[in-house]
Amino acid sequence: MICKGVRKMLGCKAAMVSYTQASRARKILQRLGYSCEVRRLEHIGPEGCGFVLTVHGNCSRVSSILAREGIPFQRMQEERDAW
């Protein structure tokens, strides 16, 4: 159910290999007009902490941009967010 005045927007979460790469991706995507943020994930496994880049946009486009810019990521997940 969609409440009156609330739109569903396509969102994308990318697990990043490091904070440096997540920050680079955020800067590039923001420069291209995407709304995004970097969040730290605590204790994701034996390797310790990790970072996720949350982008309000299409995953395939975001993936293409990151690939073109040479920014590695571990996995990407599409989701719908209420705005």
Image: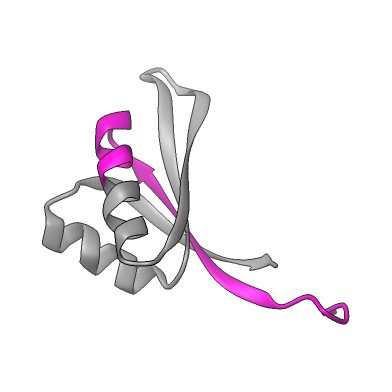
Would residue 11 be counted in the magenta stretch? yes
Q: Relative to 76, is 41 above or below?
A: above
Position of residue 19 relative to residue 4, above or below, is: above
Q: Quadrant of residue 32?
A: bottom left
- Which part of the image, by quadrant, shows the N terminus? bottom right
The location of residue 37, given as percent across then percent down, is 47, 46
Stretch of the chain drawn in magenta:
1-24
Q: Position of residue 52 (x, y in %)?
A: 44, 41
| Residue closest to the eye, 15 or 25 | 25
Total numbered labels placed on residues in the image: 0
Which is more toward the observer, 31 or 65? 31
Residue 45 in the image: above or below residue 7: above
Residue 29 sits in quarter: bottom left
The location of residue 38, given as percent across then percent down, is 45, 40
Identify the residue shown where x is 32% and y is 39%: 23
Image quarter (top left, top right, bottom left or bottom right) of the C terminus: bottom right
Q: Residue at x 14, y 56 (%)?
A: 69
Q: Residue at the location (22% across, 58% down)? A: 66
Image-based side of 19 in relation to 11, left or right: left
Magenta highlight on residue 61: no
| Up-down relation of residue 74 to residue 1 (above or below) | above
Q: Residue at x 26, y 31 (%)?
A: 20
The answer to whether 21 appears left or right of 77 in the picture is left
Q: How is the image coloured?
A: one colour
Q: Is residue 55 left or right of residue 16?
A: right
Percent x, y for residue 21? 25, 38
On the rendered structure, is 42 left or right of 14? right
